[in-house]
Amino acid sequence: MASGMRVGAATLLLGALLAACSSVPVKTQPGTATPALPPIMNFEPVAWNALPGWAEDDPAAAWPALLASCRAPRMPPAWGEFCRAAAAVDARNGLAQRALIETRLRAYRVVTRNQDGKRERFDQGLITGYYEPVLH
């Protein structure tokens, strides 16, 4: 997988995962400093070419995973039209795949602000993922 694909896919995955996050109150010990409040996260729509590495990404490398997601029983019905269109695209045609993604989906940038509303940039973060094996 190309480095750009990992960056582009990571950006989209991070946005989806952050949307599902919620904050947990932090308990402090008496006499200790109050921890900083968590940042406020917003999602801003951006052009696809604004995503780092998007132009260099190879959509064909991720196409089998996308099609597998479309076949998942928990895929929301709202994705039906997109998934039917994706299934009709040649798995080797990266240009057609890119065109479908860019015309049917929106890219978002995760924007973080401190509690005063000032924009902040975070170069590090923590993502928690879960894996559930299915045995047959």
Image (cartoon, helix red, strand yellow):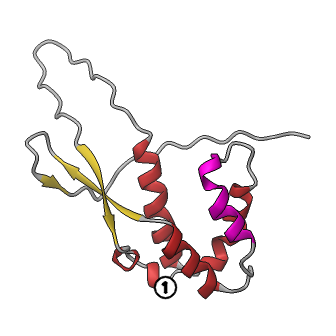
Up-down relation of residue 111 to residue 82 (above or below)? above
Q: Residue at x 48, y 78 (%)?
A: 4
Residue 44 among those drawn in magenta: no
Q: Can I make out residue 89 in this image?
A: yes
**Residue named by callout 1:** 56
User: In the rendered view of the protein, which quadrant contains the N terminus?
Assistant: bottom right
At which x and y percent is residue 49?
A: 38, 80
Q: Main secondary structure of the magenta part?
A: helix
Up-down relation of residue 98 to residue 118 (above or below)? below
Helix, strand or loop under label 1: helix
Residue 73 lies left or right of residue 102; in this view the side is right
Q: Residue at x 35, y 74 (%)?
A: 47
Q: Examine the image and state in which quarter residue 99 appears.
A: bottom right
Residue 79 among those drawn in magenta: yes
> Which residues fall within the magenta stretch?
76-87
Query: Residue type at mark 1?
Result: Glu
Up-down relation of residue 65 to residue 19 (above or below)? below
Q: Can I make out residue 1 in this image?
A: no
Q: Examine the image and state in which quarter residue 92 appears.
A: bottom right
At which x and y percent is residue 55?
A: 45, 84
Task: Say few, some or many: other residues with alpha carbon within 10 Å of mark 1 (under 14 / 14 to 19 / 20 or more).
Answer: few
Which of the two residues, 131 or 116, is positioned nearer the viewer here? Answer: 116
At which x and y percent is residue 68?
A: 74, 59
Residue 63 lies left or right of residue 125; in this view the side is right
User: Count of labels shown?
Assistant: 1
At which x and y percent is residue 70?
A: 70, 57
Q: Residue at x 20, y 15 (%)?
A: 29
User: In the rendered view of the protein, which quadrant contains the C terminus?
Assistant: top right
